[in-house]
Amino acid sequence: MVNQVAFMLFINLHLLSVHADRGLRATKQSKADEEANIAIDLLMQRTGDRTSADGSNRSALAQRLIGLMQPMANMYRALPKNKAGLLDHDALRYALHRSLAHRRGWFIRGLEPEGAEGAEVGGGEVPDYLQAVEKNEVSLHKDGTSLTGLASLTAAFEDEGIKEATDKMKAILLMYGLPSQGKVPSSVLRSVTDTFFMDFVLTGSFPAKTVEDAERFKAAKWGKTAERDDPWWRSLQDRLITTDPDGQADVDLAMKTATEVPLAYQGALLNTCQELKSTLTGLEGNTPGRVRLPAFYRQGLAGRWSFSERPEYLRSLGALDETNPEQPLVITTNYILSRTNCFQASPLYAVCCPVECWDLMGKLEEQFQAPTANASRLAEVIEQLASSTVEAPHKLSEAVRRRLDDVAVANDGVVPLHGRLFAQWMHHVYPRECPYPHEAGTVVQQTPEAWTRESGHTHASASKAELEAHVEGDGCSATVGPQGPCDDSVKRELPWKGTEELLVGLRPRAQKDRQDHWIEQSQQDLEQDVEHDAHPHNATSPRSGTGAALLAATGAFSGCIFFLLKRIMEAKSFVQSTESTEKANKLVQSTEEVKVP
């Protein structure tokens, strides 16, 4: 019976993969089955499982793979592909970043579109399990990444986060002198998991080395470091740690709890994220998604939120609109999603607020199931698409509608759904949900500690005196509306830059006037056009460019994975040697409150 279930799971994997990979209609069932088996072998290798006699554990892993593939399928269909109908490096990086952030709230260092701190620092070694992914997963497709490969890579990153957590729990159990299996008093197991959670909240900087020190530290610090998360944490404990009638609990439940915390922790941040958005929205003037900098600082001085980041730091994060240098504005969505509001859960990843724009993009991908869309049809769909702050149906203004036509003009008559110009257009339509997309290389997401090291500033936050000077120097009255009269005369137009950036063959292009919109093409692009015309099944995909074509021809996937893993592990090594050490020293030396978002 179990083998029949496993067979059905493999069939489902095959159907889902073939349906998503529309460019590969000739894919045979044997190849899909081979991919599924390789992906499951990789999962078993990372988890240390062995195939059971009845195949039940392989069935469970196949079900996990399907669970990953299903929510990714619409995105995968809509992403631009290379000539082999697979994802190349830029699209793979985008897909991994988005899937991990959307599923878990994890912003992996090195996968962010803006780049990550420490990515340039060398010396980090790639762990064995990631080397296995790089080496073995090439067998899935040598010319790029399939949907099965994307799911397998997503599982690999999740497994690394789980491994970090379970290794820490094993160390804590050892410190408490508890066995790795069997039963212990439920109260003891709750204390052990409390220690684990406090260590997680302190990003691995829990200073206690003995049980006595751990209990004293928790008693002194719990209210300051974990108070906000306490309801979420107690609910998780109550759900996972079941107590026998005799007051005993299974030690395995501690490991289960450790596994669940990193996977579900974004849930603890949701209320905070919603309150933050509500507060910033209430500070807006006539321009949605923008808050004047003095009003931002005024709220920081008077309210519960620590709005104190220096203008230079906000600029580095891409959260400052300086279209009018005399009236700088905080870009609310970019600020909410910036690293300053993320929880640095581990050297590998930070847990950040949800990107609401991806819910909107998911609906568009489901609707069009292609990398590009017709501008008129896209406008019709958008006008029926509601967000948390935009009701539907809603009528696009003529100016916004013309902008969408301009995006199509700059891209040979179609709108690339994952290009920079369309992301910018979405920011104009949904300014409180979709972040403003800065041009590549102009912003870097850094923690306050990393920014101060690099910038030379002593603090990323301004002092109280500096904040008061900003507020007192405000030329707008604070008594007329939440923003004063500065915006009352006319609604400010959100900034628009005509630089396009595409996921396939990333080539920044300046948008020209409507009367002169034809983009000069290189000889390589013309050759791509010939190839494009010869393969009508790729008719909806933008040209991949010579670079992407060469990558595909030479087996790009191995290089893609190696590049991604190298960046991530270099950043991880860099952060382990700096921020964790600094935080541990501060905790030992001070009893001040540890700031968590």
Image: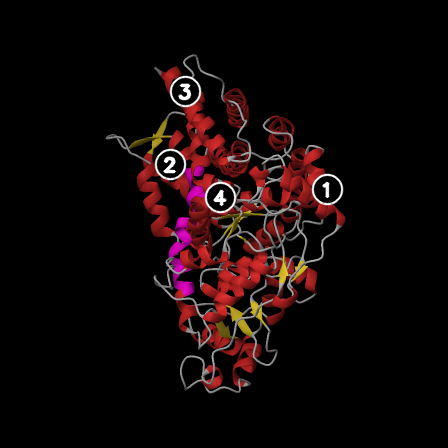
Q: Position of residue 336 (x, y in %)?
A: 49, 61
How far apart in space, not on screen, are marks 1 and 4 (Cα)? 34 Å
**Which residue was labeled with disc 1?**
123
Q: Nearer the viewer, residue 543 or 73?
A: 543
Relative horizontal placement of residue 334, taking residue 222 as reference (left or right): right
Report how many numbered discs are placed on residues in the image. 4
Q: Position of residue 270 (x, y in %)?
A: 39, 54
Secondary element at image label 4: helix
Q: Which callout, 1 or 4, points at the residue further toward the start of the chain? A: 4
How far apart in space, not on screen, are marks 1 and 3 (Cα)? 42 Å
Secondary element at image label 2: helix
Query: What residue appears at the point 50 percent right and 63 percent down from the top-left corner?
Result: 427
- Which residue type carries mark 3? Ala
- Which residue type carries mark 4? Met
- Label annotation for residue 59: none
Query: What residue appears at the point 52 percent right and 22 percent down from the top-left corner?
Result: 37
- For the stretch drawn in magenta, the main secondary structure is helix
Mark 2 or mark 3, which is nearer to you? 3
Q: Position of residue 561 (x, y in %)?
A: 64, 37
**Which residue was labeled with disc 3?**
6
- Which residue type carries mark 1? Gly
Callout 3 crowding tier (Cα within 10 Å): few <14, some 14–19, many ≥20: many
How far apart in space, not on screen, are marks 2 and 1 (Cα)? 39 Å
- Which residue type carries mark 2? Leu
How far apart in space, not on screen, are marks 3 and 4 (Cα)? 26 Å
Query: For the view shown, which residue lies furthest in the right direction?
Result: 523
Range of the magenta residues? 257-277
- Label annotation for residue 189: 2
**Which residue was labeled with disc 4?**
75
